[in-house]
Amino acid sequence: MMSLADLEKSLPPGRLILDPDVIAKYLHDEAEWAPFERPLAVLRPRTAEEVQIAVRWCIDTGTAVVARGAGTGLSGGANALRDCMVIVLDGMTTIREIDPLERLAVVEPGVVNDDLRRACEELGLWYPPDPASSPWSTIGGNVATNAGGVCCLKYGVTRDYVLGVQVVTGTGDLVRLGRRTAKGVAGYDLAGLMVGSEGTLGIITEVTVRLRPSRLPERTVAGYFDSIVTAGRAVEAVAASGITPSALELVDKQCLLAVDAWKNMGLSVDADVLLLGRVDTPGAIGDDEAHRLQRVFEEAGANWAVHSTDQTEADALFAARRLAYPAMERLGPVLTEDICVPIRAVPQMLARIERIAAHRETTIANIAHAGDGNLHPLLIAPHDDNAARARAQAAFTDIIDAALELGGTVTGEHGVGLLKMDGLAKELDPAVLDMHYSVKRALDPHNILNPGKVVPAR
């Protein structure tokens, strides 16, 4: 059996990290309260072949493997397991190809989302998936969690843009899945299976993504509401109107206050809840849609609504939406939900969250990709208050149960990881869970790829 020293000799110098102080930087992602333990070592590869060498060593030694990108995840999916190998892919940062004719890009997993978007923009192209963490999160991590974002209401999530992947499998093979063509139904969709698998079925070492032409500037509509339930009814009204905004985001008073306290943007002066809509349809049709969206806001109960003509001001409003989560983190540990419910259930779900907050005596702020029903309640409890933390965890479970009762799902874009495994067991039929176990056994026969994550242990 090969030792760690043997593995280190088989890799270029500096790839394998054994220094405890350096290893400490890679213990967990951003999921508050998700458990983690001390890994055996950290690998920072530069090639797919180096990943393959490490995985084969892990198979031979029975060592678990946890893949990690930038560590911006919010479910504990990248958290280290005891004596595992953490493979950190943020050093594989090459954009290998951008093809304007075929409208695709080939990238390594450590490429940062916004870096790819900028590179595409220079060629008149656009990569739509845009999670709030896009300035820092990597494409590999986005694929592993099937990340969404602000514009997924109209343009879809990461899965809709992945054409193919290169993967190191649980048997130590390096394979290509998917295609480069616009169409393709040859065999099972194994590339699609990797999207959202959170490192449990393979380690992604390259991604081929679909691109779109660059968009014209968006028109922004902002509305102030006196409650999140009223704002939720406005979201339902937008869907009923037939308008498909390029974004429809909700930010509540607590988040606005936190952003103001941090960045002094003055957003919380007049608004209890801010609803932000965007329209990117070109020409006069787009102008009409923006005015219609404003009218829908007003008719649904907005106490103030405006179609912004100042692009700088509009961008600042959406910047505040992206800043809401880190602004709340400044106030204390944040336990983040990621439920998704049918559009007609958005008002009811927001009302349920308010009742749960009162019942559990827990501070819950709200941000949301409201237009597609993806809600992100932010539960806050001090580190040093065990009773408050217990109440917050109970509220976390209550919110999941409420989402399922309303026909929703436990996660819209953050993934299951460690935090949502109990919820997944409630959501899926036992026969469907058995299908998950069968896929896991087939693709990871040695059970080394992120074991104990996503699918609850039997």
Image (cartoon, rainbow, N blue to C red):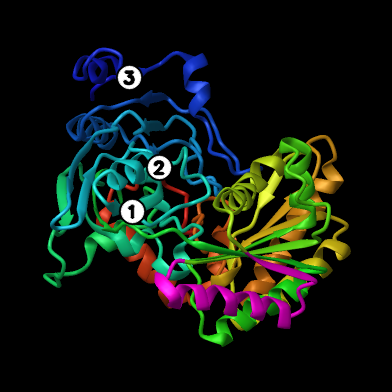
Discs 3, 2 touching: Cβ within 8 Å: no
Could you tell whether 176 is left or right of 89 in the image? left
Please give the range of residues in magenta.
280-307
> Mark 2, residues whose alpha carbon is within 10 Å: few (<14), some, or many (≥20)?
many
Q: Is residue 175 above or below residue 155?
A: above
- Name the residue beneath numbered marker 1: 127
Q: Residue at x 19, y 69 (%)?
A: 188
Amino acid type assigned to the residue bearing label 3 in the image: Leu
Label located before the other in sequence (3 or 1): 3
> Most prominent secondary structure in the magenta stretch?
helix
Q: Is residue 457 above or below residue 98?
A: below
Could you tell whether 363 is left or right of 398 in the image? right
Amino acid type assigned to the residue bearing label 1 in the image: Tyr
Label located before the other in sequence (3 or 2): 3
- Name the residue beneath numbered marker 2: 114
Considering depth in this image, is 68 or 287 the residue closer to the camera?
287
The mark lying in front, picked from 3 and 1, is 1
The mark lying in front, picked from 3 and 2, is 2
Q: Residue at x 55, y 49 (%)?
A: 75
Q: Position of residue 211 (x, y in %)?
A: 26, 57
